[in-house]
Image (spheres, helix red, strand yellow):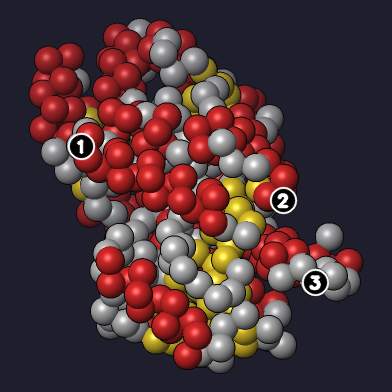
């Protein structure tokens, strides 16, 4: 079987890590197949798959030209199946297509995409994908429900396959590395960590107000907000100034991938205050680094975090403040959450993800799924 992966968005955070880890696991675990990796120009080193053929066409995402060139590429390379780990598929193609629809965030949270034209285009592309894909993969049962709800997709064609955690994200115990990363980002004492880009649904403003209550009740910590905030950073800084907590809040901006494990590992607690997540990678990454998690009870997050997080209603800032205080002051709770996090991670494995994804390919080709490994 010859399988093509459209990896042109591999440089994007989140989706890019999913693409990289999935493809590397599939290629290593199932070397009997041939693989074609469609990558952005100059980025062949982003995937460690030396036995796979890599091509780097200059095809802009969401362009008319890609709709012409992708079918030509698939035909010329005699591809049996295309997997788009993002939701775009060519409108015309001669082989089955599997698409991963991670979530429908811009339909469920339109405030995250202010452009009406952008939302309309996004909806049309998502609807086209949900109709045209031979099979659809999504990351959680919650996302599957939303795909059916917003796109009216056939639930029988949707498979829920949990992603894993990038193996580079693991607990760091080297004191020098931990101290170095804290110096680099201006962290001076015990801190609460929140990782992720700025979007209204990420609820950074609610977190700042809850942190203000945490400090007012006697809590002592810094709040480290890690990730590119874009235009939202100025607004959040103004809110921190208004609340009188600006000196206790650190905005790191973009964090080098090499620094992430140490940044997680040195935190006292990792908080996910989101109003909506299709999966929630940062929750698992924190658990992989041995950090207790305080987590929103919204959308897919309880499905991902299981019993290994202390939950709160993301609309209730006082409840979040109390949860943060409880984790800081209750050492037994901290230890229990860390141990439960370790066990929860056993549910998520890229090898398992790869096997289950390959089983979807066989179903898309209407071939029997071989072997118990694909069950």
Tell me which label, 1 or 2, sits earlier in the chain: 1
Tell whether label 1 touches label 3 (CB within 8 Å): no
Q: Which residue is mark 1?
A: 115
Left or right relative to 361: residue 123: left
Between residue 268 and residue 278, name the one nearer to us: 278
Residue 274 makes an appearance in the image? no
Between residue 350 and residue 83, name the one nearer to us: 83
Residue at 32% x, 30% y is: 110
In which quadrant of the rendered image does the N terminus lie? Answer: bottom right
Spatial CA distance of label 3 from label 2 is: 30 Å
Name the element at disc 1: loop
Residue at 17% x, 22% y is: 240
**Image coordinates for residue 148, horizontal then vertical, percent:** 59, 35
Q: Which residue is mark 3?
A: 367
Crowding near the residue tagged with mark 1, few <14, some 14–19, many ≥20 C-alpha atoms within 10 Å: few
Q: Quadrant of residue 230?
A: top left
Q: Quadrant of residue 133?
A: bottom right
């Amino acid at each position: 079987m010859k399988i093509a992966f459209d990896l042109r968005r591999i440089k994007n955070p989140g989706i890019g890590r999913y693409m990289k880890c999935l493809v590397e696991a599939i290629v290593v675990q199932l070397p009997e197949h041939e693989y074609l990796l469609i990558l952005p120009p100059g980025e062949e080193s982003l995937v460690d798959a030396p036995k796979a053929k890599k091509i780097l066409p200059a095809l802009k995402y969401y362009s008319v030209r890609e709709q012409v060139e992708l079918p030509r590429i698939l035909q010329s390379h005699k591809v049996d199946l295309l997997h788009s780990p993002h939701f775009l598929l060519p409108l015309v193609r001669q082989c089955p297509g599997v698409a991963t629809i991670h979530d429908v965030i811009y339909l469920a949270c339109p405030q995250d995409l202010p452009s009406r034209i952008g939302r309309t285009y996004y909806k049309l592309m998502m609807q086209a994908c949900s109709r045209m894909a031979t099979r659809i993969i999504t990351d959680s049962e919650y996302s599957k429900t939303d795909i059916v709800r917003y796109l009216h997709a056939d639930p029988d064609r949707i498979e829920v396959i949990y992603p894993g955690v990038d193996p580079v994200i693991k607990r760091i115990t080297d004191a020098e590395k931990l101290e170095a990363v804290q110096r680099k980002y201006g962290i001076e004492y015990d801190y609460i960590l929140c990782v992720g880009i700025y979007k209204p649904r990420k609820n950074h403003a609610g977190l700042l107000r809850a942190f203000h209550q945490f400090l007012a009740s006697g809590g002592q910590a810094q709040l480290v907000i890690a990730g590119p905030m874009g235009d939202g950073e100025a607004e959040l800084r103004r809110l921190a100034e208004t609340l009188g907590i600006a000196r206790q809040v650190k905005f790191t901006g973009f964090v080098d991938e090499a620094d992430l494990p140490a940044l997680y590992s040195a935190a006292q607690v990792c908080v996910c205050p989101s109003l909506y997540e299709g999966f929630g990678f940062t929750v698992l990454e924190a658990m992989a680094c041995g950090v207790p998690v305080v987590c929103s009870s919204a959308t897919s997050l309880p499905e991902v975090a299981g019993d290994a997080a202390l939950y709160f209603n993301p609309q209730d800032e006082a409840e979040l403040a109390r949860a943060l205080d409880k984790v800081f002051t209750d050492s037994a709770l901290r230890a229990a959450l860390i141990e439960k996090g370790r066990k929860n991670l056993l549910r998520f494995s890229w090898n398992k993800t790869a096997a289950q994804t390959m089983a979807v390919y066989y179903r898309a080709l209407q071939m029997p799924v071989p072997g118990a490994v694909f069950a």
